[in-house]
Amino acid sequence: MRSLDRCLLVVLTAAVLLPGLALADIKIGFINPIKVLEMAPQAEAARNDLEREFAQRKEDLEAEDASIKRAEEKLGRDTAIMSESERQKLERDVLSRKRDVRRAKEEFRDDLNLRRNDELAKLQKEVLKVINELAKEKGFDLIVGEGVVYASEAIDISEQVLQRLRQLPVPANTKSSKKPGE
């Protein structure tokens, strides 16, 4: 059981078991983490940065795919007029290039996923900081997020968190267009 779920369970159990504790004295808030992570301006900036960072590699892979397709079409179209050695050489070349592109695409996906996870971790850290600041300022005893079946709009503080995130400076692109390790 996650610590947030455990905390909620302890608070609710205490509220039920201890007759002197009134629920009205506990201020509970709810945050929709998916909404906040999708709508935060920092998330949009991170998506744009990643797109710029990986655009050239994506274009290069697409161009190589198109080039391989042209070579395959030539092979299919000109097989009858090619010598056996030319045909075999072109087949080997196409096969080798397909393998290289497949490896490059896998490396591209891995690099993109690593960078996306890095950016998500930074954003989650920023969101958590804002939630903690807001909770302390507004006097919340408990803020819950994931795993909530129902939360009234009266306790949903997602918009307040988003407003705070919108007030923070959006970091500029600090990564270069080079792939990791270059």
Image (cartoon, rainbow, N blue to C red):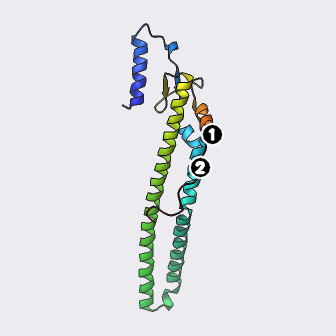
Q: Decide: is 24 above or below 135.
A: above
Left or right of residue 177, residue 167 in this image? right
Image location of residue 175, percent across then percent down = 53, 57
Left or right of residue 163, residue 125 in this image? left
Image location of residue 178, percent across then percent down = 51, 64
Is residue 126 something one can see in this rendering? yes
In terms of depth relative to the viewer, which is nearer, 154 or 115? 115
Q: Quadrant location of the C terminus?
A: bottom left
- Kind of residue at disc 1: Arg
Residue at 54% across, 59% down? 53
How would you rate the neighbour count of disc 1 (Cα within 10 Å): few for under 14, some for 14-19, many for 20 or more? some
| Tag shown at residue 125 | none
Q: For residue 97, which quarter of the picture?
A: bottom left
Q: Decide: is 102 above or below 15.
A: below
Q: Decide: is 2 above or below 154.
A: below
Q: For residue 173, which quarter of the picture?
A: bottom right
Is residue 31 something one can see in this rendering? no
Q: Quadrant location of the N terminus?
A: top left
- Kind of residue at disc 2: Ala
Q: Which residue is mark 2?
A: 45
Residue at 41% across, 76% down? 96
Q: Which residue is mark 1?
A: 166
Q: Earlier in the sequence, mark 2 or mark 1?
A: 2
Q: Decide: is 89 above or below 128.
A: below
Asked whether the residues under the numbered discs 2 and 1 touch, taking CB atoms below 8 Å apart as contact, a structural biologist would say no
Q: For residue 2, which quarter of the picture?
A: top left
Task: Specify the farthest residue to the top.
Answer: 20
Is disc 1 placed on a helix, strand or loop? helix
